Image (cartoon, grey):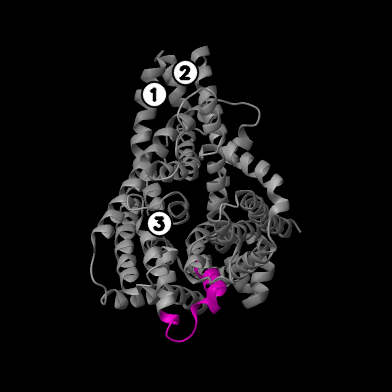
Amino acid sequence: MAVRAFPVSTKSGISAAALVVTLILGTLCAVISRAEAGTGFIGADWSALRFTVWQAFLSALFSVILAVPLARALARRRFAGRGVLVTLLGAPFILPVIVAVLGLLTIFGRSGWLNGLLAQVGLPSISIYGLHGVVLAHVFFNLPLATRLLLQGWQTVPAERFRLAAQLRLTPWAMFRVIEVPLLRQIVPGVAALIFVICLTSFAVALTLGGGPKATTLELAIYQAFRFDFDLGRAALLSVVQLGVAGGAALVALWVLPVISLGGGQDRPQRRWDARGGVQRGLDGAVIALGTAFLVLPLLAVVLRGLSGAAQMPTAVWAAAGSSLFVAVISVLVLIVLMLPMAGWIASKRAGGVEAIGLLGLSASPLMIGTGWFIVINPVMNPADLALPVTALVNALMALPFCLRIVVPRLRDTVQDFGRLSASLGLRGWPLWRWVILPRLAPQLGFATGLTGALSVGDLGVIALFADTECATLPLQMYRLMGAYRMEAAAGAALLLLVMALGIFWACDAMGRRYAAA
């Protein structure tokens, strides 16, 4: 078979996988060993655990509830700019969290646009801080994800089912109940479980919009025990609990994630006879308009406020931007070194390690790994001296599961198509990668590295544990400006961070496509 004939080194892939497992599980062992010296759970820790689960549940619930009508409206309507809007739904995934939070504050904060409008009509102001603020931010990030997944499911419904429903003269409600409700029963539990896991390990949102005894997540409690009390035992104990909760939820999510395949169709384009009425057209239009406004207005607010605040940025912002760029570059390089041999091993040997490594990445949060690295490094040297390299390494490890799922399918196709020919020509090592693999893998590799670079440049996680007053990335510097109530300067930094994240993603993605076309 071509798979067995493909001359990709297995040893390098196994070595890379072993290194990844060692880096993650090694820090876990360090955390567990330190947790044994802890004093046990206190009342505040139980409160943080309850809040973590509750906010994740509410975030998943509202994200799915709001995504259902939005995905349904997008599935039923064709209009100018629809493709751009669907593409825009992927933007929050690479958007730096701290930038999105500032945009939400500009809209919903104490001095935001909404409270200004409420004041003009004589209504009391609202506060974005606390549980509702955390849930609002999580819905902003996860509503597009839920919509994309549901829309993908809707597009798999065979067109013949809608044609048959029209011939039977089913009402719109009957069509929804007969065709679409079974689809939702299949997809919604998995989507909700995935969002629940993501929200369990969200740190930056809780750091900026939570806080206080009633709005502290486990990750925020780890940070507080680490930075404020320097109680490594308690931080380690909380990390173990957080790992258990997130790991259990990840197992459930992996179990309930559906395989979206209804079958029975002939790949004809869908034509919806249940959406021709003026009332239904108006409702769908209103849903799409509201969803678009919810996603676009915070980004627009960041741009407008950032343009006015760019002149007020201190010089430390530019130094922090250089540090963030360094972290992004190192993360991308580490990702390539680990991902390519692992992807080659998985594709050529049909190894089933992708799911296991992905589950490991979902279960182990960056803050838990950062705590473990601090425990390992602290007896030997000052952890702040390694703040940037450790941040880059952790970001690469967190991006690895997603990037493997991007790269492996295309590499597996290359194995099937060119494996035997490459073996017969004696292509091995670098010539094999240069002439056979990389030209065909370049678009996926560019997308994966762009995703990693964008996520790394905007990360506010590990750096918050390791950094001192003289070392900061741009997200951390922006958070410090917000804490000092220098909101205009923070807005300028947010615009710079937004440009850097999108620019890194675009540059890597475009480079991969250009290399593939060369």
Question: Which residue in the structure is indicated by mark 1?
Answer: 176
Picture quarter with the C terminus: bottom right
Residue type, numbered disc 1:
Phe
Cα–Cα span, label 2 and label 1: 9 Å
Of residue 38 and residue 357, the one placed in the foreground of this image is 38
Q: Residue 133 appears at what percent x and percent y? A: 43, 43
Check whether the beta carbons of the residues at disc 1 and disc 3 lie within 8 A of each other: no
Q: Residue 268 appears at what percent x and percent y? A: 54, 30
Of residue 70 and residue 200, the one placed in the foreground of this image is 200
| Residue lying at 45% horizontally and 64% vertically, measured from the top left | 366
Q: Nearer the viewer, mark 2 or mark 3?
A: 3
Question: Which residue in the structure is indicated by mark 3?
Answer: 201
Q: How many residues crowd around disc 2 within 10 Å: few (fewer than 14), some, or many (20 or more)?
A: some
In what element is the residue under mark 2?
helix
Cα–Cα span, label 2 and label 3: 41 Å
Q: Which residues are magenta?
A: 376-394
Q: Residue 193 appears at what percent x and percent y? A: 35, 47
Q: Is residue 377 magenta?
A: yes
Check whether the beta carbons of the residues at disc 2 and disc 1 lie within 8 A of each other: yes
Residue type, numbered disc 2:
Asp
Magenta segment's dominant SS is: helix
- The reply to whether residue 12 is in sight is yes
The residue furthest right is 518
Q: How many residues crowd around disc 1 within 10 Å: few (fewer than 14), some, or many (20 or more)?
A: some
Which mark sits nearer the N-terminus, 2 or 1? 1
| Residue lying at 44% horizontally and 70% vertically, measured from the top left | 370
- The reply to whether residue 7 is in sight is no
Give left or right: position of 90 versus 189: right
Q: Residue 449 appears at what percent x and percent y? A: 61, 61
Residue type, numbered disc 3:
Thr
Q: Which mark is residue 274?
A: 2
